Image (tube, grey):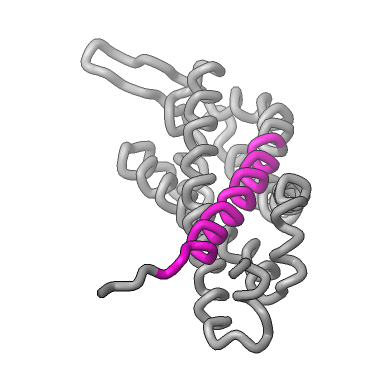
Amino acid sequence: MTVSEKMGPGSKSKGKNVLTILGSGVAAGLIASLAVSALILLAERVALLPVGTFYLMLVSAITQTQEYSLFSIAQGLLLHLATGSVIGLIMSIPFAVSQKAYVSLGKYAPAYGLAAGVAIWLVLFLPVTYGVMLPLLQSLDGQAEISQRAPIGDLFRAATSELLTMIDRVVYMALVFNAFYGLLALILTKSFASAILERKPQVVL
């Protein structure tokens, strides 16, 4: 039995199939977020920024505090992963409720994913960056710095004024990261859902 047959309107397992696709979306969103997190940490290291700078700024923008600690980095990472999981769920909804959309996902997942990534960048990243994080950095300009410490001293150090000068590069890099997230999330959603829906039930004797 094919996936399209299983998702037919007369199928008694339609509700289960919908939940399968939605669950696949959540898992795919989480995995894609982890991949993007690795890219973010790598980009910070290449830019000689303290590891976790993005997550520190994210938490600071939300809490309106400037607590630069490992706990704040962990909070930012968890928030990023949770947001990625929710976005993965939202992205999977059209394919869960529409058989035609789900079938087309097999062929157009990369295109849908890239388009979704750009939409996330426009609707979520840009407003948060220019509406919340940038004003926070401007209010701290010249007053604070972020450093990564070790027993031998500071490994990396960056003043908030330096981060302001990098904002344009961050925005363009985020477009690439978000497109990658959308691409990976939808490809994984299709792969996970197909693997479950096409799996033949085993008969236990």
Q: Which residues are magenta?
A: 176-201
Return the x and y of residue 154 as percentages of the image width and height.
Answer: 34, 16
- The image quarter containing residue 167 is top right
Chief SS of the magenta region: helix
Outermost residue, front side: 205
In the displayed structure, would residue 50 be above or below residue 180? above
Residue 5, image quadrant:
bottom right
Quarter containing the C terminus: bottom left
Res. 25 visible in picture? no
Q: Is residue 52 above or below residue 183?
A: above
Relative placement, left or right, of 190 versus 144 is right
- In front: 51, or 181? 181
Residue drawn at x 67%, y 80% as measured from the top left: 8
- 189 part of magenta stretch: yes
Q: Is residue 6 visible?
A: yes
Quarter occupied by the N terminus: bottom right
Question: What residue do we see at 43% from left, 47% from top?
Answer: 76
Quick check: 22 above or below 39?
Answer: below
In this rendered view, identify the residue nearer to me: 4 or 204. 204
Residue 163 screen position, x and y as percent: 60, 28
Q: Is residue 92 magenta?
A: no
Which residue ends up furthest to the top in the rendered image?
A: 152
Coordinates of residue 132 in the picture (x, y in percent): 63, 51
